[in-house]
Image: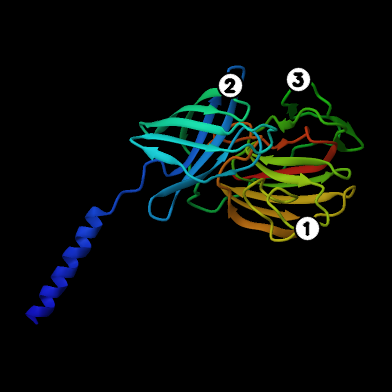
Amino acid sequence: MKKYISTALLLLGFVTTLSAQAPSSPAIIGRWDLTVDQGDKIVPSWLEVELSGIRTLVGHFVAEGGSARPISKVNFENGKVNFSIPPQWDRTDIDLVMNAELKNDQLVGTIRNNKGETHPFVGVRAPLLKRSAPPVWGAPITLFNGKDLSGWHTQKPENQWVVEGGVMKSPRSGSNIMTDQTFNDFKLHIEVRYPKGSNSGVYLRGRYEVQVEDSYGREPNSHLFGGVYGFLTPNEMAVKPAGEWQVYDITLIGRRVTVVANGKTIIHDQIIPGITGGALDSKEGEPGPIFLQGDHGPVEYRNIVITPAK
């Protein structure tokens, strides 16, 4: 009996020693909402760092535009972090490079973009946006009255959006448009139509793009119709041919999103990791508008109704 007790105590001591020697997770691990000062404007970015295996840090990065790009290695030592990634949409050979320092649980540093421009930024930990209880839905709100652009404003001073026959139209590439009101959790019904080859997007809280694109006949992809751009891939391609009305019913609760396209649930209660390219800002803990992309080709919207949580 004494032999068994001694053996058990020895094993317990061994496990305790291993636990004491186990390295703590690097403080850089997690998701970060970044605010970049480009001088003439403030733009959002996003960073995710995670551990791959025993000690290698990897991640994803979202710049002002484009989608989440993989980072093959994140270097982190003595509170300093840096990484580089190749261009995505920029026609250049210049890598994007981040250099920063973790101070008081904030990231402070610079980003050299793929154009070779260097700008300062500050990063804070992204909120989890967990909800403690199911939402209680309020009364539906008609966001577009079918007559004019009341309750909406464009991102740029120039406005190409018009209203004809109960339809909100962007006949050509120009400014994006958004609601004057902002929202937290909601259910959104929206209908969209576009010509062959065109492209738009519905931004939830102005930060998470559900892709609108002529994707008929293609396999599902996070960059195509119904995807949360660069993050979430639909389970099937539910798009109709260009020229037909496409119907979205989207529910957003915290970070959890459900997308029903043309009557089919293509994304069910999935977590959106962070902001997508083209977001208005990176303030994920705040309410935001419904934001429609109008800078990627002609598009039409109608029957826009939101049911916010109380």
- Residue with the most extreme left position: 2
The answer for how far apart the CA atoms under marks 2 and 3 are is 20 Å
Earlier residue among tags 2 and 3: 2
Return the residue nearer the eye: 87 or 159: 87
- Residue with the most extreme bottom position: 1
Mark 2–mark 3 CB contact (< 8 Å): no
Which residue position is annotated with label 2? 38
Amino acid on which the number 2 mark rests in the picture: Gln
Up-down relation of residue 251 to residue 183 (above or below): below
Amino acid on which the number 3 mark rests in the picture: Pro
| Image-based side of 54 in relation to 189, left or right | left
How did the renderer colour the structure?
rainbow
What residue sits 52% from the left and 46% below the top?
72
The answer for how far apart the CA atoms under marks 3 and 1 are is 35 Å
Residue 119 in the image, given as x and y percentages of width and height: 54, 23
- Please identify the quarter of the rendering in which residue 79 is found: top left
Which residue position is annotated with label 1? 238
Q: Which marked residue is nearer to the observer: mark 2 or mark 3?
A: 2
Please, what secondary structure does the residue beneath circle 3 have? loop
- Please identify the quarter of the rendering in which residue 139 is found: top right
- Please identify the quarter of the rendering in which residue 264 is found: bottom right
Amino acid on which the number 1 mark rests in the picture: Ala
Which residue position is annotated with label 3? 157
